[in-house]
């Protein structure tokens, strides 16, 4: 799975010439393929969205898949100031979600802490000419000079990609939005913050329906917050949300308008022998994703990734140790705030492999069928065209092999929090600070080609 991985392209998201200097605004904060995998969007802390498009397959080499090149860049969110609360609202893009394509245009949702926006991405390669009432500059003609009627025609022009805002969904969240998810009915979507989940119609911006509210009457009684939420891929009435207590709640919108009473609660009983000061912090679920089949849930907490079967609530079906070697380092990770990092997790197209990030620009893949796992590194060395990614190993002392990395020399400022997997092929996108790495598995490409 990992050893035959071949890199097609590495893209510097921020287009900086000076690679040693990274501004806060250039740090990538979300990565998302569209439903066909032909487009890939990234959002950053500066409120920008960069869309990459896959070039057509090369005709000379039948197995050479097209590279991803910049398709469009636009400013999605600007910094704002809430005068009522005296709060600055960051422009950072928290999430991007593509809508399934219905026509020639593409649509995507992007959100910062407070406001969700719907964007239309369209192409123009023709322009109308020969207006009767306007001149070539678009100014109105003097009607007395118009003596004949002509039929306007469409003339070819250089391809132009236009991005236009279609909807702004604002003023519905008191707390920070952490998730957006488009429903399988293609008409509604939800946005989730720390304490509430709202349901929106894509065509209506001035109202939303509150479907989950865990805010206690007295905020001093607050014991948990919502960390992530997602709709079921096939059943438009089902959604799941995760909490800082490590639990998952499956809700059915057919049961009640307010889904405060869950249909199922997925929770793993705590092992008393592992109990420590950090237990609650590291058990907080930072991400939850339905499998493409809709049968399983993938979650990520600080040290592990877990797969849950929707029919088994009392414990996870599979547990994968992402970086167990950090268990002895939790005290220093708490002091430098790394213990609060929110790692995401993703499925591959067939739900057979899961991927999630780690420190030192490492990311981990776990093959559910063979129980093989691999640690790979997103770095400039591994990103040369046709370079093969070498598996990396972290050791905890004792005998070290030649290429092993000591747990004490890991760089905790380099973290892979955001990853994405192409919906059908073995192509992955890895966000490492301000760089976007795109790797593809050559062997699988050829086998499925």
Image: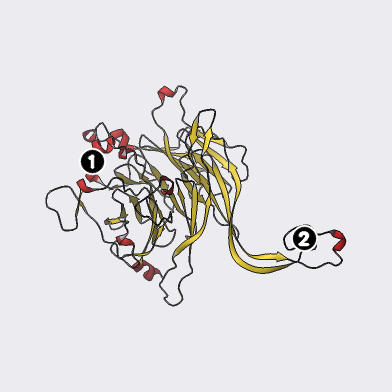
Q: Is residue 337 above or below residue 404?
A: above
Q: Considering the image in quadrants, where does the N terminus appear?
A: bottom left
Q: Is the residue marked by circle 2 packed among few (<14), some (14-19), or many (20+) residues within 10 Å?
A: some
Furthest-front residue in this view: 18
Q: Nearer the viewer, residue 27 or 187?
A: 27
Q: Nearer the viewer, residue 32 or 198?
A: 32
Q: Position of residue 358 (x, y in %)?
A: 31, 48
Furthest-left residue in this view: 399
Element on which disc 2 rests = loop
Residue 130 lies left or right of residue 249; in this view the side is right
Residue 190 lies left or right of residue 369; in this view the side is right
| Residue depicted at 87% across the width and 66% down the height | 147
Q: Is residue 446 above or below residue 430?
A: below
Residue 95 lies left or right of residue 343; in this view the side is right
Disc 2 target residue: 134
Disc 1 target residue: 327
Q: Is residue 170 above or below residue 157?
A: above
Q: Considering the image in quadrants, where does the C terminus appear?
A: bottom left
Q: Position of residue 342 (x, y in %)?
A: 37, 42
Residue 237 lies left or right of residue 409; in this view the side is right
Q: Position of residue 258 (x, y in %)?
A: 53, 33
Element on which disc 1 rests = helix
């Amino acid at each position: 799975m990992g050893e035959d991985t071949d890199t097609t392209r590495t893209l510097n998201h921020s287009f900086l010439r000076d690679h040693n200097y990274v501004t806060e605004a250039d740090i990538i904060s979300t990565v998302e393929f569209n439903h066909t995998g032909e487009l890939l969007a990234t959002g950053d802390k500066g409120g920008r969205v960069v869309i990459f498009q896959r070039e057509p397959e090369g005709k000379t080499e039948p197995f050479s898949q097209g590279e991803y090149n910049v398709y469009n860049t636009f400013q999605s969110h600007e910094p704002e100031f809430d005068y009522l609360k005296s709060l600055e609202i960051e422009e950072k893009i928290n999430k991007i979600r593509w809508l399934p394509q219905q026509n020639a245009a593409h649509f995507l949702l992007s959100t910062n802490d407070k406001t969700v926006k719907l964007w239309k991405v369209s192409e123009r390669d023709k322009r109308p000419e020969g207006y009767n009432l306007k001149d070539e500059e678009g100014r109105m003609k003097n009607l007395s000079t118009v003596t004949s009627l002509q039929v306007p025609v469409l003339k070819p022009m250089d391809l132009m990609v236009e991005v236009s805002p279609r909807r702004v969904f604002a003023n519905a969240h008191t707390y920070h939005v952490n998730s957006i998810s488009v429903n399988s009915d293609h008409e509604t979507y939800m946005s989730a913050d720390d304490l509430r989940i709202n349901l929106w119609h894509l065509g209506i911006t001035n109202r939303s329906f509150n479907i989950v509210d865990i805010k206690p009457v007295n905020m001093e009684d607050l014991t948990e917050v919502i960390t992530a939420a997602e709709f079921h891929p096939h059943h438009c009435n089902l959604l799941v949300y995760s909490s800082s207590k490590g639990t998952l709640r499956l809700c059915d919108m057919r049961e009640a308008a307010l889904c405060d009473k869950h249909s199922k609660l997925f929770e793993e009983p705590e092992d008393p022998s592992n109990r420590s000061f950090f237990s609650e912090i590291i058990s907080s679920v930072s991400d939850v994703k339905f499998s493409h089949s809709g049968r399983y849930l993938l979650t990520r907490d600080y040290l592990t990734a877990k797969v849950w079967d929707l029919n088994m609530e009392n414990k996870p079906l599979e547990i994968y140790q992402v970086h167990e070697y950090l268990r002895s380092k939790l005290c220093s990770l708490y002091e430098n705030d790394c213990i609060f990092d929110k790692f995401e997790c993703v499925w591959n197209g067939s739900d057979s492999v899961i991927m999630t990030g780690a420190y030192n620009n490492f990311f981990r893949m776990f093959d559910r069928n063979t129980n093989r796992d691999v640690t790979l590194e997103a770095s400039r060395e591994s990103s040369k065209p046709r370079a093969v990614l070498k598996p990396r190993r972290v050791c905890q002392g004792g005998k070290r092999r030649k290429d092993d990395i000591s747990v004490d020399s890991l760089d905790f400022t380099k973290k892979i929090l955001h990853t994405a997997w192409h919906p059908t092929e073995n192509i992955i996108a890895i966000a490492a600070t301000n760089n976007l790495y795109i790797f593809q598995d050559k062997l699988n490409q050829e086998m499925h080609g």
